Amino acid sequence: MIETAIKANTAEANRLYLRGLAAARGGQRRIAAGLLTRSVQLDPQNEQAWLWLSGVLDDPHHVAFCLRAVLKINPVNERAQQGLAWLEQRQLLNGAPQPALVLEINLDEPSLPDEKHTQHESWWVNWRQARREINRVRLIIWSIPIVLVSLALVLYQTFAIATEASSSDSTPFAISSAMQLEMPGSAIEPILEPEPASIRESLTVGYLSALEPLREQLRNAVDSYLNATDQPGGESVNRTMAAQRLHDSVRQAHATMEQLKPPQDLQAAHDEYLKGLELEMEALNDLMEFYTTYEVQLANRAALNFQQASNHINQAKIAFEAQRQYMSEVTSVSPHSVR
């Protein structure tokens, strides 16, 4: 008789069932029979284990025993019913069965562990769990001082850096404060400005001077394009070539202007002008495509882009002219004139 204490380990039974299932599928019938027999001994309520065991046994009586075990667990299992019917139809169940370990299993016997085995296993499991908890607590306890020391070092280093910076910054402040106390009537003024007015003026003049030939080049390119396309009934090839020449001029001007470094006061106008040139290039691309396909939507899109480009460029021109007027007024005042 099989000990009931072994039957209680369902986890081991499931592991043996999976191994037996793999052996059965691999054609290793004897290995599968041993593994599945051990599995149903540990867990007699595993329906699939009984069913697979019936497929790897040779004795019809042993097969019938396994199929009846399946029907005892699940009375509506069709495969077990068909297997028993097949054995009975061929009269394979006559005679005495061969002795086998699987026939010693009592399906009605409860799968409860023996009390001594349960107590032994429970003591062992509890002891191992207690050891793991103790080790975890020890690790936490030993980690706390290390974390505290690391935190103290970081705080000390941060404090040292801050103290050094504050001491270096406070020295000139203390000297200037002492000078101010000694000379109550004096006022401390900064020696250097971030960007003196003379430097800003020179940057602005240089930027506007570099921008003027570029704008003149664009005006000439636009006049050439208008002269080439002003004649009524011109060929589409000529119009396309004129648009391509204007597009090349705009692209070159855009690349040149990107290399310029505008002063802070004209940065917004600089970006507006670049945006206008980009829209002009998009409009010219649509226009060249229109001359070859004559699709109305291309002409409409080109007209819209030209209008938006004109708005951006006009905004930039207003800013350029205003800054130019201001610079002419500033530079017209001599440094030796009476103010």
Image (tube, rainbow, N blue to C red):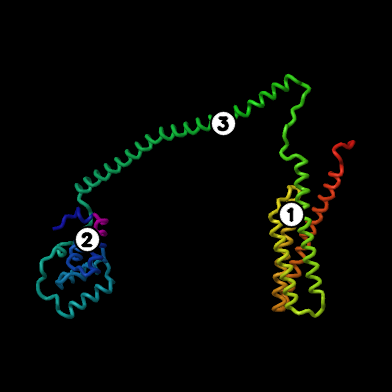
Mark in front: 3 vs 2: 3
Residue 22: x, y in percent?
25, 65
Q: Nearer the viewer, residue 47 or 238?
A: 238
**Residue at x-position 81% and y-position 72%:** 227
Kind of residue at badge 3 = Ala
Query: Label 3's element?
Result: helix
Label annotation for residue 270: 1
Residue 107 spot, x, y in % from top left: 20, 62
Q: Is residue 45 visible?
A: no
Which of the two labelled residues, at mark 3 and mark 2, occupies the earlier sequence position?
A: 2
Disc 1 on helix, strand or loop? helix
Q: Residue at x 73, y 32 (%)?
A: 191
Residue in the image at 37% along x and 34% along y: 142
Q: Where's the C terminus, which quadrant?
A: top right
Q: Is residue 99 left or right of residue 210?
A: left
- Judging by the rendered image, the residue that carries numbered circle 2 is 39
The residue carrying mark 3 is 162
Q: Residues within 10 Å of mark 2 (few under 14, many from 20)?
A: many
In terms of sequence position, does the residue under pointer 1 or pointer 2 come before the other? 2
Q: Left or right? Give the position of 247 relative to 93.
A: right
> Magenta residues: mostly which secondary structure?
helix
Residue 215 position (above or below residue 24): above
Residue 290 is covered by the magenta coloring: no
Name the image quarter holding residue 147: top left
Q: Where does the magenta region start and end?
A: 9-15
The quadrant of the image that shows the N terminus is: bottom left
Viewer-side residue, 213 vs 160: 213
Note whether residue 40 is visible: yes
